[in-house]
C-alpha cells in the first residue's frame, strides 16, 4: 500500500504544480477554449481522485472496521495484496491531513453554493423592483428574455430555475439587430454549457486552497475560457466581425480598447474575434480530448492495481 500512496502523491503533485503552469503558457487553449476547459476539469478531477483514493487507503490501514467494510466483497488474496497491516506510522498523519482537506473542500463548495444562491436571490429581487409583475391579463415580465428600461447598455444571463436573459434598452438602442443577436447568442452559450457551475467550482477551490497552483490557475483560466467559448458560439452563428463589433459597442464605455488591466480580457476577446486564431484539426482536437479524459484514470488504476494483480 505504501507504493500506492507514493504513486498517488506523485501524480497529484504533478497534476497540481508543473502541468497547470505549462498549460497556462500554451497557446492552443486560446484556439480551443472548450477543449481547454475540459482539460482543466480533468486535471482537477485527477487531483481530487488521488486525494480521495489515498484517503480511503490510509483510513482502511488505520481503522480495522473501515478495512473490513471496504474489502468485504473482495477475496482474501486481494486484502493481502494491499498489505494494510504493515503500514508505516506516517499513514495515520496522512489520513488525518486528507480528511481535513476533504472536509475543508466540502465546506468551501457549500459556502460558494450558499453565497451564489444568496446573490442570485438578491439579483432577482432587484429585477422585480426594476421590472414589477404586470396585473393579471397583461402578461408577465418572467420569460426567457427580459428588457429593462436603462440608458446603460448591458446584457447578461442570470442562472437559476428558470434561467433568464436580461438586456437593457440602452443596449437595444446602441446595437444593430445582428449585433444584438450575437450578444444574446453569447449569453445563451453560457446558459447551455452551464458555465455557472464551473465558475462556482473553480472559485470554491481557489478560495479554499489559494496556494495550490492548479486551483488558482483553474479559477483564472475558467473565467477567461468561458468567455472565449461563448464568443465562439456567437461567432459561428453571427460571424466574427459582427460579434466583435457587438462586443465593442456594448463595452465602449468600459474602455474596451484601452490598456487598462481590469478590462484587458475585453481587448483580448476583440482582437481574437477580429483575427481568429487557427483552430486545431479534428484529429488533434479528438486526441487532446481523449488524452485529457484518460488522465483521471491514473489514480483509479494505481489504487486497483494490487487487487487486480492478486486476482490474476
Image (spheres, rainbow, N blue to C red):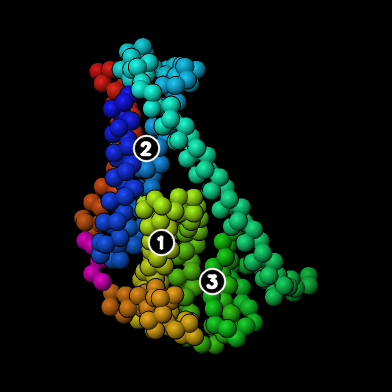
> Between marks 1 and 3, how big is the CA–CA gap?
20 Å
Q: Position of residue 39 (x, y in %)?
A: 33, 52
> Between marks 1 and 2, how big is the CA–CA gap?
23 Å
- Say which quadrant the C terminus sits in: top left
User: Which of the marked residues, 1 or 3, is nearer the chain's N terminus?
Assistant: 3
Q: Which residues are magenta?
A: 277-281
Q: Which residue is mark 2?
A: 50
Q: Helix, strand, or loop for circle 1?
A: helix
**Most distant residue in the top direction:** 76
The overriding secondary structure of the stretch rendered in magenta is loop
**Figure label count:** 3
Q: Position of residue 289 (x, y in %)?
A: 29, 51
- Residue closer to the observer: 83 or 94: 94
**Most distant residue in the front direction:** 89
Q: Which residue is mark 1?
A: 220
Q: Helix, strand, or loop for circle 2?
A: helix
- Residue closer to the observer: 126 or 230: 126
Q: Which residue is mark 3?
A: 156
Amino acid at each position: 500500500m505504501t507504493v500506492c500512496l507514493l504513486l498517488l502523491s506523485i501524480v497529484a503533485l504533478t497534476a497540481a504544480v508543473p502541468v497547470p503552469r505549462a498549460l497556462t503558457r500554451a497557446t492552443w487553449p486560446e484556439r480551443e477554449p472548450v477543449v481547454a476547459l475540459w482539460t482543466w476539469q480533468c486535471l482537477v478531477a485527477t487531483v481530487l481522485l488521488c486525494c480521495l483514493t489515498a484517503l480511503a487507503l490510509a483510513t482502511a490501514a488505520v481503522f480495522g472496521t473501515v478495512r473490513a467494510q471496504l474489502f468485504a466483497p473482495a477475496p482474501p488474496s486481494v486484502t493481502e495484496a494491499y498489505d494494510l497491516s504493515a503500514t508505516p506510522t506516517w499513514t495515520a498523519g496522512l489520513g488525518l491531513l486528507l480528511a481535513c482537506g476533504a472536509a475543508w473542500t466540502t465546506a468551501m463548495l457549500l459556502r460558494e453554493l450558499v453565497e451564489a444562491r444568496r446573490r442570485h436571490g438578491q439579483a432577482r429581487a432587484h429585477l422585480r423592483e426594476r421590472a414589477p409583475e404586470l396585473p393579471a391579463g397583461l402578461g408577465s415580465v418572467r420569460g426567457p428574455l427580459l428588457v429593462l428600461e436603462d440608458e446603460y447598455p448591458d446584457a447578461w444571463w442570470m442562472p437559476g430555475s428558470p434561467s433568464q436573459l436580461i438586456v437593457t434598452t440602452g443596449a437595444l438602442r446602441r446595437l444593430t439587430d445582428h449585433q444584438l443577436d450575437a450578444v444574446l447568442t453569447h449569453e445563451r452559450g453560457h446558459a447551455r454549457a452551464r458555465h455557472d457551475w464551473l465558475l462556482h467550482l473553480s472559485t470554491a477551490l481557489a478560495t479554499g486552497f489559494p496556494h495550490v497552483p492548479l486551483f488558482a490557475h483553474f479559477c483564472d483560466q475558467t473565467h477567461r475560457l468561458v468567455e472565449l467559448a461563448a464568443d465562439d458560439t456567437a461567432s459561428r452563428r453571427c460571424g466574427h466581425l459582427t460579434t466583435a463589433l457587438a462586443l465593442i459597442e456594448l463595452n465602449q464605455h468600459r474602455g474596451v480598447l484601452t490598456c487598462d488591466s481590469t478590462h484587458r480580457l475585453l481587448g483580448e476577446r476583440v482582437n481574437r474575434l477580429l483575427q481568429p486564431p487557427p483552430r486545431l484539426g479534428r484529429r488533434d482536437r479528438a486526441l487532446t480530448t481523449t488524452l485529457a479524459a484518460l488522465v483521471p484514470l491514473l489514480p483509479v488504476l494505481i489504487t486497483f492495481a494490487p487487487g487486480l494483480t492478486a486476482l490474476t
